[in-house]
């Protein structure tokens, strides 16, 4: 029983998931602090109403507190914008820069001109659509 647990823990995916959860929790705290301490005061300085929780309307004596929903919606939009502009966009730029000079991953295969499936470089006919391919170029040893 312990041997199975040890294999499960050391498999890699469980460790990766645990690291992801811990980093995600720390990142959540950082983003919440950024929104609470910097972005929300900036909005309250512009709008002059930092808290909408007191907003409500009454129908037949029932009080509907829509201000909390409005606060949550504004927080969601702010957090989403902060994550997109300060995390997603820079990471996408870094990934694009790192892939700029990369060579194709599989130099032993090519795409079929007819069905665009991956086929071996030396193939004479596509295994998927059976189209006849031009003769492969001889590979020269340098």
Image (tube, helix red, strand yellow):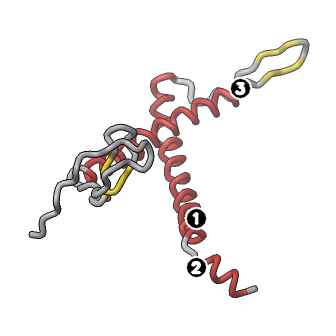
Which structural element holds mark 2? helix
Mark number displayed over residue 68: none
Q: Residue at x 9, y 69 (%)?
A: 142
What mark, if any, has residue 17 been given in the picture?
1
Residue at horizontal 32 percent and vertical 55 percent from the top: 123
- C-alpha span from label 2 to label 1: 12 Å
- Mark 1 or 3 closer to N-term? 1
Residue 80, x across and y down, in percent: 51, 37
Q: Residue 141: where, in percent of width, then height?
A: 12, 69
Residue at image mark 2:
10
Residue extending furthest right?
Answer: 60
Element carrying mark 1: helix
Against 88, is 56 above or below?
A: above
Location of residue 66 (image quadrant) = top right
| Disc 1: CA contacts within 10 A as few (<14), some (14-19) or many (>=20) | few
In the picture shown, does residue 41 fall above or below 66? below
Q: Position of residue 36 (x, y in %)?
A: 53, 42
From the viewer's perspective, is the residue at label 1 or at label 3 nearer?
Answer: 1
The residue located at (35%, 49%) in the rendering is 125
Nearer the observer, 116 or 21: 116
Q: In this view of the protein, which residue sits in the foreground, 12 or 17?
A: 12
- In screen coordinates, is 66 left or right of 126? right
Determine the secondary structure under disc 3: loop
Labelled disc at residue 54? 3
Which mark is first along the chain, 1 or 2? 2
Q: Is residue 45 above or below residue 100?
A: above
Q: Is residue 105 visible?
A: no
The one nearer the camera, 111 or 61, is 111
Which residue shows up at 51% across the image and 48% down it? 33
């Amino acid at each position: 029983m312990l041997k199975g647990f040890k294999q499960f823990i050391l498999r890699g995916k469980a460790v990766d998931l645990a690291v992801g959860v811990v980093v995600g929790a720390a990142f959540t705290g950082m983003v919440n602090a950024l929104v609470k301490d910097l972005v929300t005061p900036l909005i309250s300085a512009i709008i002059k109403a930092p808290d909408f929780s007191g907003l409500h309307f009454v129908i037949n004596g029932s009080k509907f507190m829509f201000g909390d929903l409005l606060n949550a919606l504004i927080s969601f939009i702010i957090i989403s914008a902060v994550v997109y502009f300060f995390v997603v966009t820079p990471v996408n730029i870094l990934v694009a820069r790192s892939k700029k000079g990369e060579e194709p991953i599989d130099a032993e295969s090519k795409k079929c001109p007819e069905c665009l499936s991956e086929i071996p470089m030396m193939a004479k006919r596509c295994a998927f659509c059976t189209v006849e391919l031009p003769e492969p170029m001889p590979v020269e040893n340098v």
